[in-house]
Image: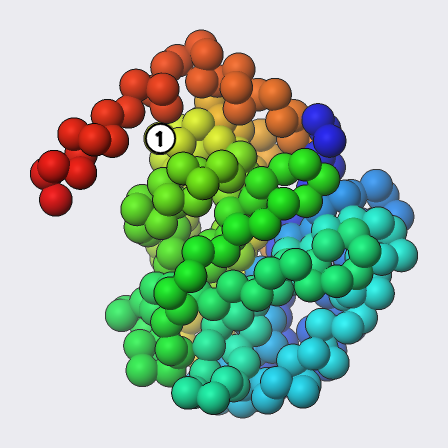
Amino acid sequence: MELLPIALIQASVLRKSPEANQEALLAEVVRSGENGAKLVILPELWNVSFPGGTPAFPPGVERTSIAPFCKAARRFGMGIVAGSMAVRCGEGTVNRCHVIGPDGKVLLEYDKIHASPFDFETGTFIPGSTLGMCAIFGWKIGILICFDMEFPEQCRSLVEKGSELLVVVGAWPADHVRIWKTLLVARSMENQVFTVGVNRCDCSSFVRFGGHSLAVDPFGETILQLDDRPRTELVLLRKSNVEKARRSHAVWSSRRGELYRKWR
């Protein structure tokens, strides 16, 4: 698919009602499908497993919570990057993103690799160790969760494996939204791919999330930016712009991987 319509769902997450969050997000997913979106992206940890919030979902509830999104994906023939949820597993709790295909089946379960040392995540989530990547409508998509974006090694690895679009599901604080926007642009420019980041925009007693969800093209140009309020917007990505950017400014083809490896 050359043209990929993507819906960015920037949400205000309620602290103690994952059911209400699921209902609200599902309504936005359905509205996005009706408006022609072929890929829908939700923010991080919408099941509100923060201190003072609800506990992590056990595996059975995880599957139940994803099921309505699977049904919506199948109904509209679209893909869904279903944000992330805190999920209990055998060893503890993971911060997990599900990617659902247009047939309604889960294509990918990606567990966040980097737990932020600056907030509650350290000691709360077991970090993952496997890259998150899948293909939808002929696009290879790399998945990152919030703090993962700070690590160019992870982003570069996804692009070296063929990702043309990096998707970041976030819960990024408003105080650092400048960093959020800068990193999204930088990851696009250094890898010459599309980058789309979807952030939360709610408040708690200890943090306010900053919104400003963003879509950046392979030239590093911002093609969509939201403000700090709940909002859903569509953006159209043109796949051929990846190669166009790489032809017009030969950064990607000028890499010297064999030399870089000698420096490690």
Instruction: Answer with the quarter of the image where residue 233 lies.
Output: top right
Taking 86 as reference, is 174 left or right? left
Residue 227 vs 29, above or below: the answer is above
**Quadrant housing the N terminus:** top right
Q: Position of residue 71 (x, y in %)?
A: 84, 65
Q: Position of residue 57 (x, y in %)?
A: 59, 85
Instruction: Answer with the quarter of the image where residue 5 lies.
Output: top right
Within 10 Å of disc 1 (Cα), the crowding (few <14, some 14-19, many 20+) is: some
Element carrying mark 1: helix
Q: Position of residue 243 (x, y in %)?
A: 52, 19
Residue nearer the viewer, 178 or 257: 257
- The residue at the point 57 percent across, 21 percent down is 241
Q: Which residue is mark 1?
A: 190
- The residue at the point 31 percent across, 82 percent down is 123
- The residue at the point 60 percent across, 71 percent down is 46
- The residue at the point 65 percent across, 59 percent down is 107
Q: Amino acid at mark 1?
A: Glu
Residue 63 vs 155, above or below: the answer is below
